[in-house]
């Protein structure tokens, strides 16, 4: 995919699609989750997440709620098309949904990576999501499928109170964590998502479950950032930069841009769908 992007100005390396195997796995995941009573599908705006969620929308009749709150870590939001531009390919998107976040906090022109969300801010975003799911009117009391990315293992850590990111575990290709949130805010981990072999008939030999120990960022550094995120507290959505209209032209990254999202830095390929 990266090689094809270098040969075409129309393709974005940071927003890869699923492979044919990824599409098969997404259909098998949908068949598995369709029996779980899903009433909401919250999905990252990235293409591979939308492609993973689409079969679940078909299987359940539940629309897709696109939200940057569950988007990739270490991302460049301006490199994505607006939600409206996805509609011809994903008519399952609910346009009336008001997302918790229309964008994310990014470095400014003087930052280390201008236009890219720092990893610390992604972790604070996961803390915000963990706090908000219980009380948000669209999700409180609902059975919510969150179709997100492997770095959202930070959300599992935030919800379950795991002592560290590493202790939260790993996410397999199309892995599904089941976490029950009580009205008292206490989360119970019911099913782990580090092994999807029970419902996937085929796995890629190059795909492995991903955890923060597998990131290019050293685990000690990630754990230090996680502790700092908890000290600073959740992201304040009111502090996010202003977001333009839902329809906007794609701002392609330069071809020599070394940026890559968090979960693309590990051994697991971008073609593997992930959900929790």
Image: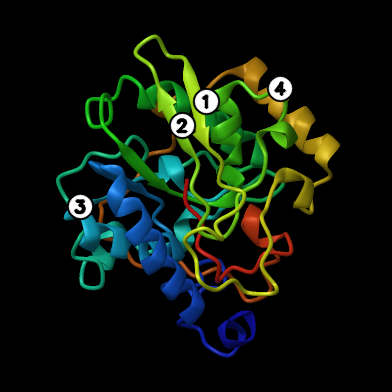
Residue 17 in sight here: no
**Residue 98 place in picture, x, y as percent:** 23, 39
- Marks 3 and 1, how far apart in space? 24 Å
Q: Find residue 66 and report its horizontal and vertical position in percent.
A: 31, 50
Disc 2 crowd, CA 10 A, few/some/many (<14, 14-19, 20+): some
Determine whether label 3 and label 1 are within 8 Å by CB. no
Say whether disc 2 or disc 4 marks the residue closer to the N-terminus.
4
> Secondary structure beneath disc 3?
loop
- Do the numbered discs 4 and 3 sit on residues whose CB atoms are within 8 Å? no
Observer-side mark, 2 or 3, equals 2
Location of residue 26 (image quadrant): bottom left
Residue ID for mark 3? 63
Q: Position of residue 228 (x, y in %)?
A: 71, 23
Q: CA distance from mark 2 to mark 3?
A: 21 Å
Which color scheme is applied? Answer: rainbow
Q: CA distance from mark 2 to mark 1?
A: 8 Å
The front one of 44 and 183 is 183
The residue lying at 42 percent from left, 40 percent from top is 69
Residue at the disc numbered 1: 159
The answer to whether mark 2 and mark 1 are in CB contact below 8 A is: yes
Q: Give the mark nearest the N terminus, 2 or 3.
A: 3
Query: Going 46% across and 57% down the picture, which residue do you hit?
Result: 78
Instruction: Give the Cα separation between the discs numbered 1 and 4.
Output: 11 Å
Residue of label 2: 179
Residue identifier under label 4: 163
Q: Which of 108/72 is in front?
A: 72
């Amino acid at each position: 995919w990266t090689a094809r992007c270098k040969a075409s100005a129309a393709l974005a390396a940071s927003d890869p699609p699923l492979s044919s195997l990824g599409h098969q796995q997404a259909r098998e995941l949908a068949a598995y989750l369709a029996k779980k009573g899903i009433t909401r599908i919250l999905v990252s705006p990235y293409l591979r997440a939308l492609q993973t969620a689409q079969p679940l929308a078909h299987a359940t009749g539940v629309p897709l709620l696109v939200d940057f709150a569950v988007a990739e870590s270490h991302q460049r939001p301006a490199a994505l098309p607006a939600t409206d531009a996805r509609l011809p390919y994903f008519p399952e998107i609910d346009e009336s949904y008001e997302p918790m976040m229309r964008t994310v906090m990014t470095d400014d022109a003087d930052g280390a990576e201008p236009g890219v969300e720092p990893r610390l801010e992604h972790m604070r975003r996961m803390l915000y999501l963990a706090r908000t799911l219980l009380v948000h009117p669209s999700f409180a009391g609902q059975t919510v499928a969150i179709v997100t990315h492997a770095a959202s293992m930070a959300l599992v850590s935030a919800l379950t109170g795991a002592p560290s990111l590493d202790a939260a575990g790993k996410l397999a290709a199309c892995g599904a964590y089941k976490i029950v949130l009580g009205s008292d805010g206490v989360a119970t981990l019911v099913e782990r998502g580090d092994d999807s072999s029970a419902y996937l008939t085929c796995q890629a030999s190059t795909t492995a479950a991903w955890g923060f120990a597998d990131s290019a960022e050293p685990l000690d550094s990630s754990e230090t950032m996680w502790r700092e995120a908890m000290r600073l507290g959740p992201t304040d959505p009111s502090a996010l930069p202003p977001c333009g209209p839902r329809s906007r032209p794609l701002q392609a990254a330069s071809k020599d841009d070394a940026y890559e999202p968090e979960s693309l830095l590990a051994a697991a390929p971008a073609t593997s769908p992930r959900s929790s």
